[in-house]
């Protein structure tokens, strides 16, 4: 009763903020279908810690951050991270409290195969993951497992990582070993996390291992990851699926691109080009009827390579067999989405490195300065971008393939009352409801990034994406639920969003239990 009154008063207080009021007036109440899957996501290197315990080998992130201790924004590394190698039981309790049915995490390749190859399987590492998956299942939480979330065994990086086609063979061995070891427990597999982001940053020179080859190695990475995915998909379906009955896909990073000036045809073309060069590049070979790279991508890179005097295209060609192996090599569309960019056609003053992915793409990426940027600078909040991204995918590749949002979230600066994240979840999940109920999109699930604050790559621990706060100064890595954890739990239970939680109330405690 008392709480009801407070809610009404607080509702009235909103009248000042036109934005939410407008939303309330227009808003229809929709519900997530009963079979809609809610989950939370993490990744091995970002949470496990225990970098040299339990027989684990070395990954490139271990090595590079030990050799370059000042590399990350806060000079940190993930030697301990959230210590989930030891605290996984507590993690599972936290997931249970959220009420979600799915937990996405990744295997650490060097924890299972310490020197990268399946000559030597680390029993302790296998036991760790088998226990984790069994405990999850006992708690009615379905594990969703990424094979490769960027922590490559060092030995392969020294050989050029994904730019060297030999990586395909070793990845195949690792994948087959993982299906054999865990396939009785794991029914959802993701092969390589965000290949676009990974190739652009790690092979274009902006992050570890800093292989600076934005026009050549970057595309070898692209090409080899697509081939590795197809190979592993086919292996799963030929050797394991009958018995294990799981699903497997390639998780793609799909930020939305909008023309900066909507009335300018050059900007509209630029936005479409940007989408093709980062989403289409990976989605078209898998989900389109024709297969292969999108025609536009093929021509842009071929033409630029030719003009630059290369004897052949910097983007390798698939054989007919490879095109066929890639086509349809996915059981659902795994979509990671965070933000929307404003894209414009370049002007004469804009310069790009030659050769490079940026020059091949030929667009300028900007942000709308009027959108809120609650945490990390690249992440401005524009919720309709998620619905538009889904529409674009559906229009290009049809509505048959189910879509699961496998990452979506926003960072904060350490507060427990994370109103920006509460708004973010409400707004983005409302757009998903519209996608389902008004567009008829085939969206089947939503996983929040992330269960708890964790090691955010180059940003170290300075960017916090968690539903649970983690105290990284505490040797016990104490976890505390943020306001958003309660609201997310509420959304999962009620199967709908609740904009009553949006307001920056002066007394937020009143809204809690
Ligand atoms: C898009 O999203 C990813 C996360 O998936 C983020 O790391 C990245 O910086 C964003 N921007 C671009 C241009 O990919
Ligand atoms: C590539 O070059 C061909 C031949 O010069 C031209 O017809 C085509 O329009 C170009 N494509 C792109 C996307 O620039």
Image (spheres, helix red, strand yellow):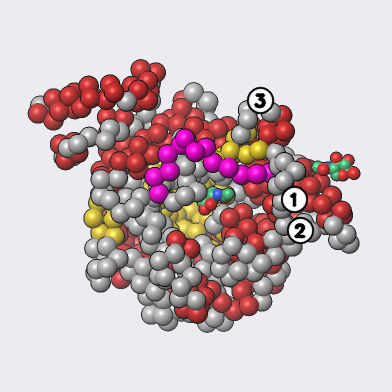
Identify the residue under disc 3.
263
Identify the residue under disc 1.
360
Identify the residue under disc 2.
355
Do the residues bearing badges 2 and 1 touch, measured as CB atoms within 8 Å?
A: yes
Q: Residue 47 sits in which quadrant?
A: bottom left
In the image, 419 versus 281, the foreground residue is 419
- Is residue 81 within the magenta segment? no
Q: Position of residue 291 (x, y in %)?
A: 74, 45
Q: What number is the disc on residue 47?
A: none
Inter-mark Cα distance, 1 to 3 = 24 Å
Which stretch is magenta?
Answer: 362-375
Inter-mark Cα distance, 3 to 2 = 31 Å
Question: Is the residue marked by circle 1 packed among few (<14), some (14-19), or many (20+) residues within 10 Å?
Answer: many
Q: Residue 138 sits in which quadrant?
A: bottom left
SS category of the residue bearing label 3: loop
Q: Is residue 199 visible?
A: yes
In the image, 503 versus 25, the foreground residue is 503
In the image, 75 versus 111, the foreground residue is 75
Left or right of 488, for residue 239: right
> Disc 1 or 3, which lies upstream in sequence?
3
Left or right of 162, for residue 474: left
């Amino acid at each position: 009763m008392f709480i009801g009154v407070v809610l009404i008063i607080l509702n009235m207080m909103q009248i000042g903020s036109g934005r939410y009021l407008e939303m309330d007036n227009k808003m229809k109440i929709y519900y997530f279908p009963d079979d809609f899957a809610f989950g939370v996501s993490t990744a091995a290197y970002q949470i496990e810690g225990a970098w040299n315990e339990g027989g684990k080998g070395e990954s490139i992130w271990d090595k590079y951050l030990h050799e370059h201790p000042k590399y990350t924004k806060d000079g940190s590394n993930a030697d301990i991270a959230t210590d989930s190698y030891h605290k996984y039981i507590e993690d599972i309790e936290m997931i249970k409290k959220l009420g979600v049915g799915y937990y996405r995490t990744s295997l650490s390749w060097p924890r299972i195969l310490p020197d990268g190859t399946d000559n030597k399987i680390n029993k302790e590492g296998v036991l760790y993951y088998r226990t984790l998956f069994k405990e999850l299942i006992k708690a009615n939480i379905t594990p969703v497992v990424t094979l490769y979330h960027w922590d490559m065994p060092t030995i392969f990086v020294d050989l050029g990582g994904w730019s060297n086609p030999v990586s395909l063979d070793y990845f195949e061995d690792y994948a087959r070993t993982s299906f054999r070891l865990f396939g009785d427990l794991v029914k959802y597999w993701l092969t390589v996390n965000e290949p676009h982001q990974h190739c652009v940053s790690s092979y274009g020179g902006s992050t570890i291992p800093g292989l600076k080859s934005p026009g050549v190695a970057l595309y070898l990475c692209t090409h080899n990851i697509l081939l590795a995915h197809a190979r592993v998909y086919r292996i799963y379906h030929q050797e394991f699926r009958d018995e294990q009955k799981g699903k497997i896909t390639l998780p793609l990073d799909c930020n939305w691109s909008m023309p900066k000036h909507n009335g300018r045809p050059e900007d509209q073309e630029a936005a479409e080009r940007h989408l093709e060069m980062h989403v289409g590049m990976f989605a078209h070979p898998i989900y389109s009827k024709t297969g292969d790279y999108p025609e536009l991508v093929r021509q842009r890179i071929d033409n630029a390579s030719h003009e630059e005097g290369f004897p052949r295209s910097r983007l390798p060609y698939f054989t007919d067999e490879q095109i066929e192996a890639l086509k349809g090599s996915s059981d659902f569309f795994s979509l990671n989405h965070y933000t929307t960019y404003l894209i414009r056609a370049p002007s004469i003053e804009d310069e790009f490195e030659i050769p490079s992915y940026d020059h091949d793409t030929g667009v300028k990426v900007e942000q709308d300065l009027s959108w809120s940027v609650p945490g990390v600078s690249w992440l401005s909040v524009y919720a309709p971008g998620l619905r538009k991204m889904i529409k674009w995918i559906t229009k290009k590749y049809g509505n048959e393939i189910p879509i699961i949002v496998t990452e979506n979230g926003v960072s904060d600066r350490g507060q427990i009352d994370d109103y920006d994240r509460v708004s973010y979840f409400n707004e983005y999940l409302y757009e998903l409801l519209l996608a389902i109920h008004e567009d008829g999109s085939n969206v089947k699930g939503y996983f929040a990034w992330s269960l708890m604050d964790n090691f955010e790559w180059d940003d170290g621990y300075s960017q916090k994406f968690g539903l649970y706060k983690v105290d990284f100064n505490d040797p016990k890595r104490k976890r505390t639920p943020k306001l958003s954890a309660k609201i997310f739990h509420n959304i999962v239970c009620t199967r709908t969003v609740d904009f009553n939680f949006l307001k920056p109330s002066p007394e937020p405690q009143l809204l809690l239990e």
